[in-house]
Image (cartoon, rainbow, N blue to C red):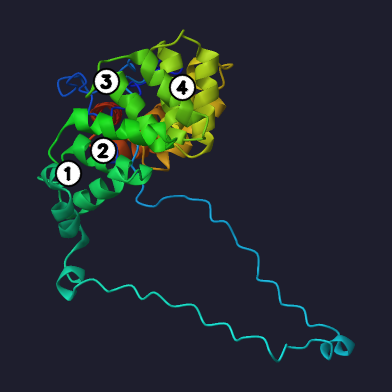
């Protein structure tokens, strides 16, 4: 079989994905008409990822809990001092302070849903809640009160059209509110909105600004996205060494896309010294997480014997895993290997 160029592959895709990311299917050449001796198709020369991903907003708010010190036990006076404590006999007794009893809300109001009560108190809010799911209504009420997590979750609903009318402008608005409060996930997603021009004017430099804010908070997806922008020179001067630095930070946190991209950088010697063994290591970590592109790259390495002993059966195993996820390039390669095997019989 022909050996693809080192580090080459089907291209590393990382599309915008508000829900769990779905890797795009890349169409390859139809190999059904190739003769039985056909080789594995030459890998497409290595374009780096196109558009960075967004991340899931978490329903849990990570607020630092401050542990209160235990109450001090009151000190008892020494036994020889107890007798000195006297109460004046003629001192007028102090009247106990009056207790204010707060009236309970009417039974009818306390039994109604909080969202309904809020709508009646605020007619403008009632209008804003139209079209939102029950969860969306609760998020909107909390978002109006400044809850950054609720703002991010509401933004995601608008961005995906799940639980709210689809509106990129509303999504960007609420992501910004959460991002301005330092919410790293919202900062990453707002950066992606700017990178794609969704709900805001397309502005690669503004995207980088928000990615950097989140990346400096150790947000893995922001670090992966920042690595892509440096590798491709999107909104920032192209710098492959800087790209590899950010990809490594994300890869070490377990981000599968960053692991695949870092493997690509090692396989191609871009931003780091070329090292096929290191490339295999990162491809495998991504492949073990089910990343179809990482599985395809790992299959390439086994098919060509780069960084690992050549093993056609192992290559087919990884191609098949990726093809089973609908990844077209892997299906094409698997078919070519099968045809080559049939030709040798």
Q: CA distance from mark 3 to mark 1?
A: 20 Å
* Mark 4 or 2, closer to the camera: 2
Q: Give the number of the disc on residue 324.
A: none
| Mark with earlier residue (3, 4) | 3
Q: CA distance from mark 3 to mark 4?
A: 16 Å
Residue shown at the point (14%, 20%) measured from the top left: 33
On the picture, is 9 further left or further right than 73? left
Residue shown at the point (22%, 24%) measured from the top left: 199
Give the SS element for disc 1: loop
Looking at this view, name the residue that lies furthest to the top.
237
Counting from the top left corner in percent of width and height, residue 15 is at: 29, 27
Q: Which residue is mark 2?
A: 155
Q: CA distance from mark 4 to mark 1?
A: 30 Å
Q: CA distance from mark 4 to mark 2?
A: 25 Å
Q: Which residue is mark 1?
A: 162
Q: Is residue 282 above or below residue 90?
A: above
Q: Is residue 228 above or below residue 145?
A: above
Residue shown at the point (65%, 69%) measured from the top left: 70
Q: Is residue 204 above or below residue 69?
A: above
Quadrant the C terminus occupies = top left
Which image quarter: residue 187?
A: top left
How crowded pointer 1 is (Cα within 10 Å; few <14, some 14-19, many 20+) is rated as: some
| Mark with earlier residue (4, 2) | 2
| Mark with earlier residue (2, 3) | 2
How crowded pointer 4 is (Cα within 10 Å; few <14, some 14-19, many 20+) is rated as: many
* Mark 4 or 1, closer to the camera: 1
Give the SS element for disc 4: helix
Q: Which residue is mark 3?
A: 196
Counting from the top left corner in percent of width and height, residue 2 is at: 37, 16
On the picture, is 178 further left or further right than 119? right
């Amino acid at each position: 079989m022909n050996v693809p160029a080192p580090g080459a592959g089907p291209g590393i895709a990382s599309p915008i994905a508000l829900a769990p990311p779905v890797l795009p299917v890349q169409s390859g050449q139809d190999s059904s008409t190739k003769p039985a001796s056909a080789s594995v198709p030459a890998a497409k020369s290595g374009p780096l990822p196109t558009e960075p991903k967004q991340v899931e907003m978490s329903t849990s708010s990570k607020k630092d809990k401050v542990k209160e010190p235990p109450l001090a036990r009151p000190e008892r006076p020494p036994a020889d001092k107890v007798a000195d404590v006297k109460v004046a006999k003629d001192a007028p007794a102090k009247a106990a302070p009056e207790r204010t009893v707060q009236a309970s809300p009417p039974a009818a109001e306390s039994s109604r849903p909080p969202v309904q009560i809020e709508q009646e108190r605020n007619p403008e809010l009632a209008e804003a809640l139209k079209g939102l799911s029950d969860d969306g209504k609760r998020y909107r009420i909390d978002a109006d009160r400044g809850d950054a997590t609720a703002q991010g979750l509401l933004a995601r609903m608008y961005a995906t059209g799940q639980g709210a009318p689809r509106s990129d402008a509303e999504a960007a608005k609420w992501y910004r509110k959460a991002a301005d409060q330092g919410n790293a996930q919202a900062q990453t997603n707002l950066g992606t909105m700017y990178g794609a021009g969704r709900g805001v004017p397309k502005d690669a430099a503004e995207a980088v600004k928000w990615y950097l804010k989140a990346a400096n908070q150790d947000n893995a997806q922001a670090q992966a996205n920042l690595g892509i922008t440096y590798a491709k020179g999107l909104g920032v001067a192209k710098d492959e060494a800087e790209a590899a630095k950010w990809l490594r930070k994300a890869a070490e946190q377990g981000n599968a896309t960053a692991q695949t991209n870092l493997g690509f950088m090692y396989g191609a010697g871009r931003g780091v010294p070329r090292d096929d063994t290191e490339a295999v290591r990162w491809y495998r970590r991504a492949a073990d997480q089910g990343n179809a592109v990482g599985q395809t790259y790992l299959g390439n390495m086994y098919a060509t014997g780069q960084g690992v002993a050549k093993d056609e059966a192992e290559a087919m195993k990884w191609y098949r895993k990726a093809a089973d996820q609908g990844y077209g390039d892997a299906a094409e390669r698997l078919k070519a290997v099968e045809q080559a095997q049939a030709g040798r019989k």
